[in-house]
Structure formats: C-alpha cells, structure tokens
Image (tube, rainbow, N blue to C red):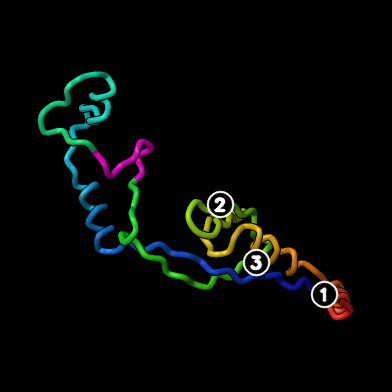
Amino acid sequence: MNKKQIIYLTKINTILSEKGKEKLDKVKNKKSDPDSMPYEWYLENGLRPPPGLEPSEEIDEDGMIELKEGEYTYEFKELVIDIQDFFYAEEASTVGSIVVFHNGEEFHVEEDAMDVYALIYLAQRTWFEKLIDKLRWKKN
C-alpha cells in the first residue's frame, strides 16, 4: 500500500482593506464610453483629449490595478499538499512563491520555491535514507 506523501506549506491570502475596496469600486464605477480612446492614447498621438476625459492613474498599461501599501493585508493559512498532485513552483513577484498543481490550480505560499522543492525531496526519501542521514549527521 502506498503511503500518501504530503508536505505542509503556508498559504497567503491577500485581503483588500477599506481603502483598497474603495479604490476598486472607484475604478469599476468609472463611466467610460466604449467608443472613446483612453486619455493616454490622445497624448501619445499628439491630440488634445476631449473635455471630461481624465487620465487613469489607477490602471497600468496592462490593465492591472496597482494596490499600494495599506490597501491590502495578508492572511496566512496552513495548506496540506499531496506531492503527487504537485506540478511546479515559481517565485512570486512579492512574497514567497506560487505553487501550481497538475489540475491547473495555483496557490500563493509563504515558502520560497527552493524551500518547496526541498520539502518535496525530503518527503520522498525512504526511512532508510533518513536513518543514514541521521547517522552521518551524528558522526560529524
């Protein structure tokens, strides 16, 4: 019978603060004409923007909303992973890493990608290999 090989990680949930919720609502509720071009487009083409059109400083060129310090908080939860479902881990742009599973699910975790791979390596070692490691450690 195969024993499940699991590792424990710390999942990071990003939670919007009141300031963050207000910023998101402001961007969502901003009225825009679907036929009009963004403010920046007019400037790039040397044209004067129409009256009433304002620059959108909240949204970057990729269409993402950048949240500043104080507009969000982190919540930490325990995450149990069966390493058979694990696909890969990559460094996150802010804190920790992103863990991806074979089914496409992704989780933001506190541990670095190298730590995740080290935990998986240790979980896959047999009891005999672990015993040899302990004996070698005591010997030194």
The quarter of the image holding the N terminus is bottom right
The image position of residue 71, as x and y in percent, is 31, 59
**Residue stretch rendered in magenta on the structure:** 56-64
Residue at left offset 61%, top offset 67%: 81
Local crowd size for mark 1, using a 10 Å CA cut-off: few (<14), some (14–19), many (≥20): few
Say if 41 sits above or below 87 in the image. above
Q: Relative to 93, is 129 on the left or the right?
A: right
Residue at left offset 88%, top offset 75%: 136
Q: Magenta region's main secondary structure?
A: loop
**Residue of label 3:** 82
Spatial CA span between label 2 and label 3: 15 Å
Question: Which comes sooner in the sequence, label 1 or label 3?
Answer: 3
Looking at the picture, which amino acid does disc 1 mark?
Lys
CB within 8 Å, label 2 to label 3? no
The quarter of the image holding the C terminus is bottom right
Question: Which comes sooner in the sequence, label 1 or label 2?
Answer: 2
**Residue of label 2:** 104
Looking at the picture, which amino acid does disc 2 mark?
Gly
